[in-house]
Image (cartoon, rainbow, N blue to C red):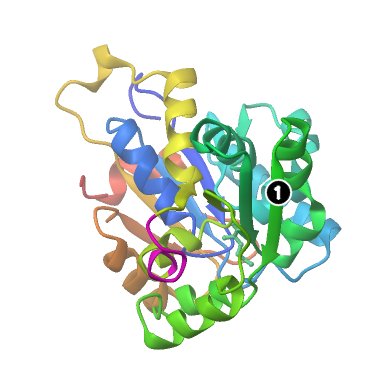
């Protein structure tokens, strides 16, 4: 496909949340190509039954494998909690989720052993974070914050409404010293959350953590990287214009945008001929 260069890395989320993970991956692996699926037609995943989310994750992962991805990163906590580890067993390429990297970071950061985790209802109800953190002897406070995703999807992360909602969800937090942002949309609310929880609480975003793990596992193919800048293809199931706006807000993730219906997208055989700009 790319003349002996590494195959692309596939990533997906229900929407724009996973762009924080894509950005971290891009910074860590600048020579690699990335295929990002934003399933914005079906966002939010957080309120949907676990089996349904697991099926979405399987369908999108298969699509990414069909597009010649050589690894898959589930940039969505809800899907990671619902679909791993069975998805990893079913796919012919390595699959990473974001829950374990977040847990590892929280374990490293906490001093008092009291950790909070916030996420969608699906993630919190699955107890994926709570069980892992407790297995390491930590006290866990968990809270579902279902409306946060909508604020971020609507570009309202820095608004007064976001702060009001953050106070509603986080105003009565117990004495934790570390808070895991257990939804890939939430890092975009970090400044707002910081204003509410104060400076003494460490905020954990799994984006950096998972990017480091993937880099470590895949390497950056230094001999092939010289003079090359990776490309990004964004596959979007919902409204393209709204999605492009969010990508521009995050910055540094320009590429080509493809609307997909039913996951029969373009073949990457055509990538070189598509005029994908490098970033
Ligand atoms: N960004 C996703 C997550 O990390 C879920 C948002 C949603 O679709 O509810 O859980």
Q: Where is residue 125 in the image (x, y as percent from the top left)?
A: 80, 59
Magenta stretch bounds: 193-199
Vertical placement of residue 157 versus 229, above or below: below
What is the secondary structure assignment of the residue under circle 1? strand
| Quadrant of the picture in which ligand 1 is shown | bottom right
| Number of dots carrying numbers | 1
Asked if the stretch drawn in magenta spans residue 194, the answer is yes
Residue 49 occupies quadrant: bottom right
Q: Position of residue 167 (x, y in %)?
A: 52, 78
Residue closest to the eye, 218 or 227 = 218
Residue closest to the eye, 94 or 111 = 111
Image position of 263 (left or right of 239): right
* Residue at x-position 81% and y-position 61%: 52
Name of the residue lying farthest toward the top: 223
Query: Badge 1: few (under 14), some or many (20 or more) residues near its Cα, within 10 Å?
Result: many
Q: Where is residue 57 in the image (x, y as percent from the top left)?
A: 70, 51
Q: Name the residue under label 1.
A: 140
Quarter of the picture holding the N terminus: top left
Vertical placement of residue 253 versus 228, above or below: below
């Amino acid at each position: 496909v790319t003349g002996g260069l590494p195959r692309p890395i596939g990533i997906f989320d229900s929407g724009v949340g996973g762009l924080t993970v894509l950005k971290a991956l891009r910074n860590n692996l600048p020579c690699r190509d990335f295929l990002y699926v934003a399933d914005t037609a079906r966002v939010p995943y957080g309120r949907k039954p676990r089996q349904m989310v697991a099926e979405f994750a399987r369908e999108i992962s298969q699509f990414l494998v069909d597009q010649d991805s050589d690894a898959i990163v589930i940039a969505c906590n809800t899907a990671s909690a619902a679909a791993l580890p069975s998805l990893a067993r079913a796919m012919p390429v390595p699959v990473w989720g974001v829950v374990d990297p977040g847990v590892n970071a929280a374990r490293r950061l906490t001093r008092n052993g009291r950790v909070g985790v916030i996420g969608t209802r699906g993630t919190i109800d699955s107890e994926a974070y709570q069980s892992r953190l407790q297995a390491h002897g930590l006290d866990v406070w968990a809270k579902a914050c279902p409306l946060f995703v909508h604020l971020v999807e609507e570009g309202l992360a820095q608004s007064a409404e976001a702060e009001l909602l953050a106070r509603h969800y986080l105003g009565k937090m117990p004495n934790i010293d570390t808070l895991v942002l257990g939804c890939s949309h939430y890092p975009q609310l970090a400044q707002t959350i910081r204003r509410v929880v104060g400076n003494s609480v460490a905020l954990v975003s799994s984006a950096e953590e998972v990017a480091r793990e993937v880099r470590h596992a895949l390497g950056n193919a230094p001999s092939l990287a010289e003079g090359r800048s990776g490309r990004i293809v964004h596959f979007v199931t919902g409204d393209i214009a709204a999605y492009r706006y969010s990508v521009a807000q995050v910055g540094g993730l320009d590429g080509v945008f493809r609307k997909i219906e039913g996951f029969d997208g373009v073949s990457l055989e055509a990538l070189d001929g598509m005029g994908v700009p490098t970033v």
